[in-house]
Amino acid sequence: MAKQYDTVIGLEVHIELATKTKIFCGCSTEFGGAPNTHTCPVCTGMPGSLPVLNKQVVDYALAIGLATHCHITQVCKFDRKNYFYPDNPQNYQISQLYLPIARDGWVEIETGSGKKKVRIHEMHMEEDAGKLVHDEWDDTSLVDYNRSGVPLVEIVSEPDMRSAEEVIAYLEKLRHIVQYLGASDCKLQEGSMRADVNLSVREVGSDTFGTRTEMKNLNSFKAITHAIEGERKRQIELIEEGKKVVQETRRWDDNKESSHAMRSKEDAKDYRYFPEPDLVPIVIDDEWIARIKNQEPEFRTEKLERYKKEYDISQVDAEILTESKKMAELFEATAALCKKPKKAANWLMVETMRLLKDNAMEPQDLRFSPENLASLIDLADAKTINSSVAKEVFEQIFLHDVDPKAYVKDHGLMTVNDEDALRQTLTEVIAANPQAVADYRGGKEKALGALVGQTMKAMKGKANPGRVNELLREML
Amino acid sequence: MADKISDETMEHVTKAKNKISDETIEYVGILAKLELSETEKQNAKADMEKMLDYIDTLNELDTSRVEPMSHVFPVNNVFREDVVTNENHMEETLANAPLRGGDSFKVPKTIG
Ligand SMILES: [Zn+2]
């Protein structure tokens, strides 16, 4: 019988913090600026420049550390990690090795096989590097230092995960926590959340770890899943052939769906860390910790439970509504204003999700106010507008946050409840469609729909379709 | 670096208490991305051995009752507020580029 293997996975997750400025200088962190427009002597490593720590970075790191049940290092400091690479103009990265801001935490994940705790070994603050663009034609690289000095936290887990499913659940959990804290937008594709996967395999029942490899360049959940499956297979094949797994860093190529070892010189992991002499220690007193703890929001896990109880919403619907903090906030505010949580949930889950998709937007990009959505729900409920008009108005709310009452009035979209006008139009429609009328009278129920449609069209969509239906039946 | 073994090196070789092996010099060269000639290696070895000997003098002091120092000044918690204070300094930054390609630094090709 073939041997059975366990996969043992630990993650190093880098998250870009949502500060306005870089970690050690007053340069903007705004994404997408022209190359080198957000740079200064500090973030380009010019001699004589001095870093000064951005306090907001410590606040965010503390919040993440506390939310992941870490022990806070109340006297912490920075160290220099030395390496030569053109993305790093100082020839060292300012990071934390000896006294990282947080240690020994955990998060709970849930997968098909139940709930499980993934332990966090440590979390530290550090600076991001610049961006290299390789020019294939003249064998050079171009360097943009706009990202150099953007604040990061790196969260290092214990090797507690056993499958790609658990890895994704862990990353989703971290993403929800950090997004709810407002500490980062955590977009994998844009690189504001990056994961390196440490993976080894061992025979089932063994209690020692196998030799692990580290995989880099994973920028989607799909790439992570493929890389885990591919690396597990590669290591098992080596072992079965009697060969050894080499401890190395491998780069995943999502197009080729395979990984290759990075050259060993680049991989010389001797960073000769030493304490950073240009930055003073950080002392975090109990009051500071209490202040951050007091600002903690209601997290997704808690919201999920509350929505099910308080609003009588299903698990699946509650998951959609709490997927982003922005959506959850819109839902709660709208429900409170119109007192119709089910209807508020419906507008957000159906029309909002559809428009987000059509406009290639994410929930955190939503800009409309709960007041306008609540007011639309009231208008539709009072039958002031019919459902197709409501959808049309909602699109305007979604795009331009219009006041639905004013919009409906200005564009004359109110449902026409004028019976005389409606009867007049119906008479005309009946006269103009003798075939449909004959079909209906001959027993074809479907023909009525065509007549309703014609009437709605003639009334420019402002009639109440229910009433049109009733009147038509009566008149025929 | 000089291409002949200096007198200082010759004099030092016999006296050094700390010895740097050939492997260590080779390894440090790789980390620093330097290619050294044989003579340069010998000179660098002597320099490092001297530095280590010098640092050894610190071990002559009794520091068992001195608290390890994390910073020169008894200062902590020096912060900046998260406010953008720097404007577009692209031209000043790029003035320091040995080679410029468009609005970027241009460097020999490096594989990421
Ligand atoms: Zn800067």
Image (spheres, coloured by chain):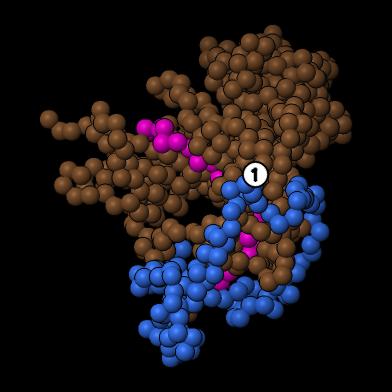
Chain colours: A brown, B blue
Q: Position of residue B87 (x, y in %)?
A: 79, 64
Taking the spot 48% from the left edge, 48% from the top edge, the residue there is A219
Within-10-Å neighbours for mark 1: few <14, some 14–19, many 20+ = many
- Estimate the x, y position of residue A414 in percent, counting from the top left: 82, 25
Q: Nearer the viewer, residue A461 or A378?
A: A378
Range shown magenta? A141-165
Is residue B36 at all visible to an observer of this figure?
no
Residue at mark 1: A76
* Residue positioned 61% across, 66% down in the render: A90
Which quadrant holds residue A79?
bottom right
* Res. A314 visible in picture: yes
Place of residue A23 in the rendered image (x, y in percent of width and height, measured from the top left): 69, 53
From the viewer's perspective, tell me whether residue A292 is left or right of residue A84: right
Is residue A79 placed above or below A83 in the rendered structure?
A: above
Q: Secondary structure at mark 1?
A: strand
Tell me if residue A155 is in the magenta stretch: yes
Residue A427: which quarter of the image? top right
Q: Residue furthest left?
A: A1
Instruction: Describe residue A340's horizontal placement relative to residue A236 as left or right.
Output: right
- Quadrant in which the N terminus of chain A appears: top left
- Up the image or down, A304 lies above or below A268; here it is above
Q: Residue at x 27, y 36 (%)?
A: A202
Where is the C terminus of chain A found, in terms of image quarters?
Answer: top right
**Horizontal relation, residue A361 to residue A367: left or right:** left
In the visual, does A175 lie left or right of A238?
right
Q: Which residue shows up at 29% across the image and 35% down it? A: A208
Q: Amino acid at mark 1?
A: Cys
Residue under mark 1: which chain is it in?
A: A
- Residue A463 is inside the magenta segment: no
- x and y percentages locating residue A293 in the rendered image: 71, 28
Nearest to the observer: residue B17 or residue B40: B17
